[in-house]
Amino acid sequence: AIIDVDVHHGNGTEEIVRERATSHPNQVFFFSIHLYQPQHTGIPDTYEFYPGTGGVDLMRENVVNIPICPAWSSSKAQGPGKRTRTSVKTEEKETVSGDGYDDVFRKCTGRSYFRSQISSRLLPTLRAYSPDLILLSMGFDGADGDVGNQNIWLDGCPCGLDLSPEDYKWATEEISAVADVVCNGRVVSVLEGGYGSRGFRKVGDQ
């Protein structure tokens, strides 16, 4: 199983997993939790939070994506009424129309939502899949104040995500607890992003 906890969607890893699934189905499970803003009319032009993918699950390939709404999104800063969600190497597009989707998605934000999705979506699925090994891609660019999750086109806006050192520590401990049950604690953790907040260096040390 590959768990990607990074402010950006793990689109490269997802593509590899999907290609692998064509010849070896059910061999790898992939989970990504990330900021998601595919097409946003902002300042000065159409703004897309990189890479703009990861809005839907791909159950046939054992891919679970958890999109998080950026905290800078507001009624005044929202894009068009229709949003188009795409995935890597997927020609089909899912169009969700109207303010209903926007109103619901705006609530899917912040560290409390992050924790709720780890608890309700990742941990039960990971336990059910029961992998032999867990690879944890841990990116600290979702930390509160990190430049990796800011929108430079909007003046005075908050960061897209506000994770604390305790959130990263908690997520790692919860995943490790599942690993103790299903694969004798076999977890390999790899450091990914984290660009502008020195205070989070201690999280990696832990």
Image (cartoon, rainbow, N blue to C red):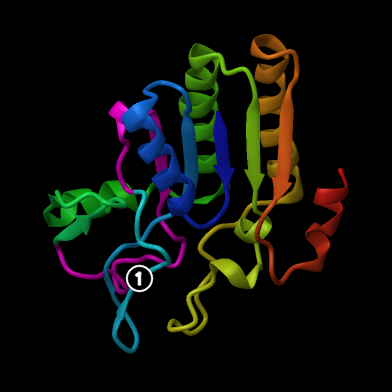
Q: On the rendered image, what quadrant is the C terminus found in? A: top right
Q: Residue at x 65, y 68 (%)?
A: 146
Q: Amino acid at mark 1?
A: Glu
With respect to residue 50, does 116 lie above or below? above
Identify the residue at the far front of this view.
23
Magenta span: predominant SS is loop
| Residue 15: percent from left, percent from top | 40, 47
Q: Does residue 189 sit above or below 75 in this rendering? A: above
User: Which quadrant of the figure contains the N terminus?
Assistant: top right
Up the image or down, 30 lies above or below 174; here it is below
User: Which residue is at the front of the view, 13 or 150?
Assistant: 13
Provide residue 83's location: percent of width, then percent of height.
Answer: 19, 59
Q: Which residues are magenta?
A: 55-81
Secondary element at tag 1: loop
Residue carrying label 1: 48
Q: Name the foreground residue: 34 vs 190.
A: 190
